[in-house]
């Protein structure tokens, strides 16, 4: 069935360093790839997303890259800050133009940014 | 931005009782709402998808008579855990989606059954 693999499961970086989280998806029909940040006791918050017709998208310190051929996508956080510490989830979905679809989530990455 | 409100945020109840959780989209119309369950240090597990005005679609292994979902309006969906038992204790999260917009999540409900 559909599957999304996410690595690493934990990541510890020094403040100011970059963090990279990688995901691989199995369903070649997936065309929408969001990333969510979940803080303790809260629901996931969308931080960035990318569609399959785009190879890269950037929003300030956060960027996402997509390799459709390899079915890989990655989250890059530059100049990390302690408040970036959280669990990050990638997800993949088939979305029709006018309609959303169900998300298949990765296993999550617990990011710790040490001051 | 899109806001999804989930209530209650935390509930403790005795075994055998039923618990209702509400999920509201506050500033957009949610044609589709999703209900997830999350165990500690694990990913989100989709339980069911509900479209306004129609019956929910449950994922394999999720008992529809145990987890009743109602999506009566474009801004409200409810999940009722019937005859709850300790194994139903978990973090339940809803999300709402309107048209081609991203899914936006509520802040979850921590359910503890004694």
Image (tube, coloured by chain):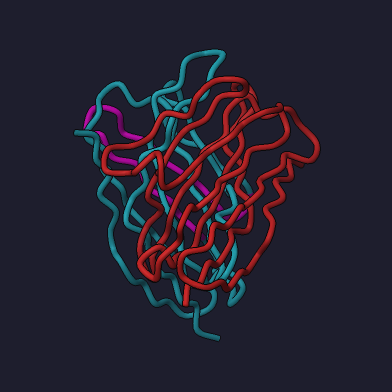
> Which residue is outermost to the right?
B27
Residue B102 point in image, percent of width and height: 58, 34
Can you say which quadrant of the picture contains the N terminus of chain B? top right
Residue pictured at 70% horizontal, 46% vertical: B4
Residue A38 point in image, percent of width and height: 53, 61
Nearest the camera: B109 or A113?
B109
Whether residue B59 appears in magenta in the rendering, the answer is no
- In the image: residue B70, left or right of residue A105: right
> Which residue is outermost to the left?
A1
Tell me where residue A79 sits by quadrant. Answer: bottom right
Instruction: Examine the residues drawn in magenta and state their main secondary structure.
Output: strand
Residue A114 point in image, percent of width and height: 50, 84
Residue pictured at 49% horizontal, 53% vertical: B81
Nearest the camera: B111 or A65?
B111
- In the image: residue A27, left or right of residue A92: left
Chain letter tied to red: B
Q: Image height check: is B76 above or below A37?
A: above
Nearest the camera: A84 or B109?
B109
Q: Colour of chain A?
A: cyan
Q: Image height check: is A4 above or below B92?
A: above
Looking at the rendering, the stretch of residues picked out in magenta corresponds to A60-77
Q: Image height check: is A114 above or below B73?
A: below
> Which residue is outermost to the bottom?
A115
Residue B36 point in image, percent of width and height: 46, 49
Nearest the camera: B70 or A5?
B70
> Which residue is outermost to the front?
B16
């Amino acid at each position: 069935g559909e599957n999304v693999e996410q690595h690493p499961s934990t990541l510890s970086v020094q403040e100011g360093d970059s963090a990279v989280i990688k995901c691989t998806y199995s369903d070649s029909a997936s065309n929408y790839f969001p990333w969510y940040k979940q803080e303790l006791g809260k629901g996931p918050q969308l931080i960035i997303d990318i569609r399959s017709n785009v190879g890269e998208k950037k929003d300030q310190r956060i960027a996402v890259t997509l390799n459709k051929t390899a079915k890989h996508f990655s989250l890059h956080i530059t100049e990390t800050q302690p408040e970036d510490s959280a669990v990050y989830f990638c997800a993949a979905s088939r979305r029709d133009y006018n309609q959303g679809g169900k998300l298949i989530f990765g296993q999550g990455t617990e990011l710790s940014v040490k001051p | 931005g899109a806001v999804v409100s989930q209530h209650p945020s935390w509930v403790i109840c005795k075994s055998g009782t039923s618990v209702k959780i509400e999920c509201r989209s506050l500033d957009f119309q949610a044609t589709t709402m999703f209900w997830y369950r999350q165990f500690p240090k694990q990913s989100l597990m989709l339980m069911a998808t509900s479209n306004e005005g129609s019956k929910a679609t449950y994922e394999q292994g999720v008992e529809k008579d145990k987890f009743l979902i109602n999506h009566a309006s474009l801004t409200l969906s409810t999940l009722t855990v019937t005859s709850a038992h300790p194994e139903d204790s978990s973090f339940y999260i809803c999300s709402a989606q309107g048209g081609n917009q991203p899914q936006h999540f509520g802040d979850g409900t921590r359910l503890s059954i004694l």
